[in-house]
Amino acid sequence: MKKKSRFVVWLPCKPYVKQFLLHEFNDPDNEWSEIVNLSSDRELKSDFISMLDKNGRYDNRYSKLYRYSAMVPVEIGKDDFYRHGWTIANTEAVRFGVKIERRIKHILFLYLDTSVGMGVPLSEAIRRFQNQYGYTEDSWSYDTIRREYNRHAKHERMHVGSTIFDLIHAKIIGELVPHMRQFHIKEDL
């Protein structure tokens, strides 16, 4: 494919969001070394397409995106380009960024909780996470990840005599019980 045949929308985002999108959805070719194609995630793609606009409307709610220092090209289809548009308002960029950030942090907390629960020191678990997803100190630093984990993670401390299976059981029951109540499923725990 040539550069002219790929339709893109430039999405402003935080550096770690850009790195995550590139890690999960990068679809490079000879012309584009970094381009995000959301086709493998239907929900994310349809959400992104719904934010597009043709007019390039100005939205002053977020007039300056200081924290959004990175830009990533997101590929859209020719039909979407002409039907829905080719620009994204700042408010929509922030909304999409927040959605991706939540996904990243969910993965982070799950990864770190599991690693720490298996006896891996937190510092090593963070470094492994950074290596796994390609985060550099510039895109998402060790200290920032550690602060985020300490601030927002639900910590289940393993007590003396407990096993990893006790932690897993507590995690699963903690996740399933609220969902079971939502659908009025009788609990036999």
Image (spheres, grey):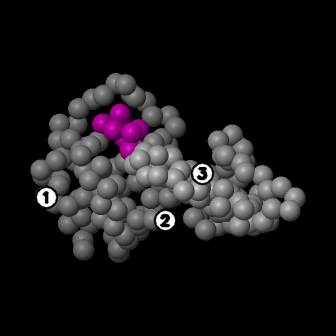
Q: Within the image, what quadrant is residue 148 found in?
A: top right
Judged by depth in the image, the label closer to the viewer, 1 or 3, is: 3
> Would you say residue 92 sits in the magenta stretch?
yes
Amino acid under disc 1: Asp
- Which stretch appears magenta? 89-97
Amino acid under disc 3: Gly
Secondary structure beneath disc 2? helix
Residue in view at x 30 percent, y 50 percent: 48
The residue that mark 2 highlights is 23
Distance from label 2 to label 3 (Cα)? Answer: 30 Å
Taking depth in this image into account, of 153 and 88 the one nearest to the observer is: 153
> Would you say residue 85 sits in the magenta stretch?
no
Percent from the top left, x then y, of residue 58?
27, 29
Taking depth in this image into account, of 188 and 12 the one nearest to the observer is: 188
Q: Are marks 2 and 3 in contact (CB under 8 Å)?
A: no
The residue that mark 3 highlights is 174
Amino acid under disc 2: His
Percent from the top left, x then y, of residue 150?
72, 44
Taking depth in this image into account, of 156 and 182 the one nearest to the observer is: 182
The main secondary structure of the magenta stretch is: helix
> Farthest residue toward the top?
60
Task: Choose the circle earlier in sequence order: 2 or 1.
Answer: 2
Q: Is residue 98 above or below residue 46?
A: above
Distance from label 1 to label 3 (Cα)? Answer: 44 Å
Q: Is residue 23 above or below residue 102?
A: below
Percent from the top left, x then y, of residue 6?
24, 64
Q: Quadrant of the C terminus?
A: bottom right
The residue that mark 1 highlights is 79
Residue in view at x 60 percent, y 51 percent: 174
Residue in view at x 24 percent, y 71 percent: 2
Distance from label 2 to label 1 (Cα)? Answer: 26 Å
